[in-house]
Amino acid sequence: MAENLLEVKDLEVDFRVGDGKVVTAIKDVNFSLIKGHTLGIVGESGCGKSVTANTIMKLLPKESGIIAGGQILFDGKDIVPMSDEEMRNIRGKHIGMIFQEPMTSLNPVYRIETQMTEMLLAHEKLTKKEAHERCLEMLKAVGIPEPERRLREYPHQLSGGMRQRIMIAMVLSVKPELIIADEPTTALDVTIQAQIMELMGKLKEEMGTSIILITHDMGVIADIADDVMVMYGGNVVEQAPVADIFEHPLHPYTQGLLASIPRMDMDVETLAAIEGTVPSLAEMPTGCHFSTRCPYCTEKCRSENPAMVDQGGHKVACWKYE
């Protein structure tokens, strides 16, 4: 039987937004990640994908973010009650995260090599020379030209795409058990995107690394993910193996996402779109969070939020399947 590396159970995260008011960002989030597998998390901006990732890393803002309930079991241990010191021993070495915006993750006053070797020396028993060689190896692996020169440079001297590749190289250099990649190829051209996805796939194959990939790109999901979790309005609305999601999407939101993907045989004028926008956390509908945009909405949808039901290994939260 496959062994789970990560299990998230009934996770709820709230945020204080001023004047004593609290809003719920994600609620009743449940999923598991098998060792060596890739889980793709998809959904529009504001659906709760990045909040879920930052919660797993325990990187919520201390003054406003609250884990209001649930468990996050990593290798069988709940990280929710762990101290900052315990989490520092897990971050980087065991769970690595590739952030969407690299300029906020790289320190502008330190050279690239200083930042890369700092993490290597903290988590690996390497000499400075060995750490230097590992840095060069990883920069070459992510397609950075003149790696010796780049190691001597500061973040502001590099392009956005180059900084993103530096961040990816830093995370991959310590070969963590789990990589959480939050839109890792947003700033990269399609050629480099393919190289990065190939590199992550290779690490998964050779090292048994598990990956959580957060992306808007359903094409990337189709290429690399084993399982897919669709989020909307802070809830999980559908979960299934990747082939099932693409061949038989059950939730109207998932159907809308897939219908909006352009195809070679499609007239641009016929490209489908999901009407409306994701509601703000303070204005989330009472019932199903997708009810204000759903073409199949009923009175029950507007008043009650559906629970997740299992349709033969394909899970969906929609009143159509109750």
Image (cartoon, grey):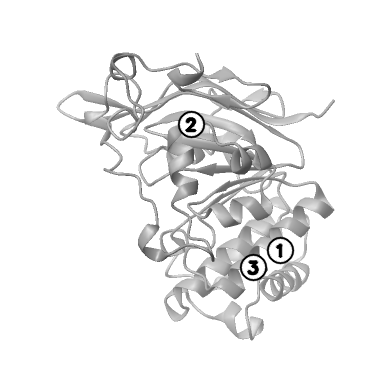
Residue 88: percent from the left, percent from the top? 58, 41
Q: Is residue 153 above or below residue 218?
A: below
Between residue 207 and residue 122, name the one nearer to us.
Answer: 207
Q: Amino acid at mark 1?
A: Glu
Q: Is residue 103 above or below residue 282?
A: below
Query: Which callout, 1 or 2, points at the residue further toward the start of the chain?
Result: 1
**Mark identifier at residue 194:** 3
Other residues around mark 1 within 10 Å, as few (<14) / some (14–19) / many (≥20): some
Measure the C-alpha gap from mark 3 to mark 2. 29 Å
**Mark identifier at residue 198:** 1
Dot 2: what SS? loop
Measure the C-alpha gap from mark 1 to mark 2. 30 Å
Residue 116: percent from the left, percent from the top? 61, 65
Between residue 87 and residue 207, name the one nearer to us.
Answer: 207
Q: Amino acid at mark 3?
A: Ala
Quadrant in the picture for residue 267: bottom left
- At x 81%, y 52%, the residue is 205
Q: Are marks 1 and 3 in contact (CB under 8 Å)?
A: yes
Measure the C-alpha gap from mark 1 to mark 3. 6 Å
Q: Is residue 191 above or below residue 235?
A: below
- At x 28%, y 26%, the residue is 23
Query: Which callout, 3 or 2, points at the residue further toward the start of the chain?
Result: 3
**Mark identifier at residue 251:** 2
- Residue 279 visible in image: yes
Q: Amino acid at mark 2?
A: His
